[in-house]
Amino acid sequence: MRDVADSVIRIPRSGLPRLLIEQHGGQSSAQAVASPDAHLRSRRVATRSRILGTAWGLAIALACGGPGDPYLYGVDLRSALDAPSYTAAPTYRDQARALLEAAAAFWKVQPQDFAGLTVTVYGATIPCGGGTGRCTGWFQSGACTIDLDAEQTACLGQTQLPHELLHYLLYRWTGSSDPLHTDPRWTQQLPTLEAALATCP
């Protein structure tokens, strides 16, 4: 699949949400309605940024995989043959759903924002970075996949899934998954979420 960064998706003006085109740049509502071109020319930079963010998020959503598991908000959760035994427990999908809900609430998004991701749990370290290294978690933006090494874990919350979900959200928000971890959320906020999820049910 082509990386979404290689594609350009154009959204017609008529397709933009009303909320994104209602700022009038200092004009009254009546002036803006009477002169839509002047209104559009005078939009604030913040409005443009919101439109671009919405378009980018839509592009990423379109680039991700199929519908996934409706119970998991569209995430396709898979277990490799060597995955830990807890992935076969009757409550495993419930735990995964609760993790997605907790991560979404923490980052102030909806669980459906993870739709299209394919998450695969393995029982050993996984190749990452194009096969040049070994990782315990790896988000691949072009394929919208997350691979997890769960060998030393007792539940899904102890894997790198919360970490990799932040990579995905940053990619969705900014167009970069921040592989060098320069965003302050890695150190200032993510540890709180990881600690909350690391306690197995």
Image: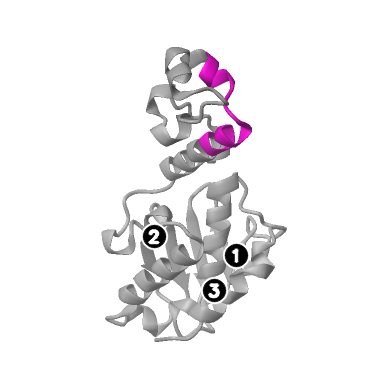
Q: How many marks?
A: 3
Three-letter amino acid code of the residue under disc 1:
Pro
Kindly identify which residue carries mark 1: 127
> x, y (%) of residue 118?
42, 58
Query: Of the residues under marks 3 and 2, which one precedes in the sequence?
Result: 2
Callout 3: helix, strand or loop? helix
Q: Are marks 3 and 2 in contact (CB under 8 Å)?
A: no
Q: Is residue 165 left or right of residue 186?
A: left
Question: For residue 175, what is the image quadrant?
Answer: top right
Q: Nearer the viewer, mark 1 or mark 3?
A: 3
Q: Can residue 141 be found in the magenta stretch? A: no
Query: Of the residues under marks 1 and 3, which one precedes in the sequence?
Result: 1
Quadrant location, the C terminus: bottom left
Three-letter amino acid code of the residue under disc 3:
Leu
Boundaries of the magenta span: 38-51
Identify the mark at residue 2; answer none if there is no mark: none
The residue under the point 60% across, 30% down is 44
Location of residue 106 with respect to 20 vertically, above or below: below
The residue under the point 55% across, 34% down is 47
**Label 3, label 2: how far apart the Cα atoms are:** 15 Å
Kindly identify which residue carries mark 3: 193
Callout 1: helix, strand or loop? strand
Location of residue 2 with respect to 44 vertically, above or below: below
Location of residue 64 with respect to 166 vertically, above or below: above
Q: Can residue 39 be found in the magenta stretch? A: yes
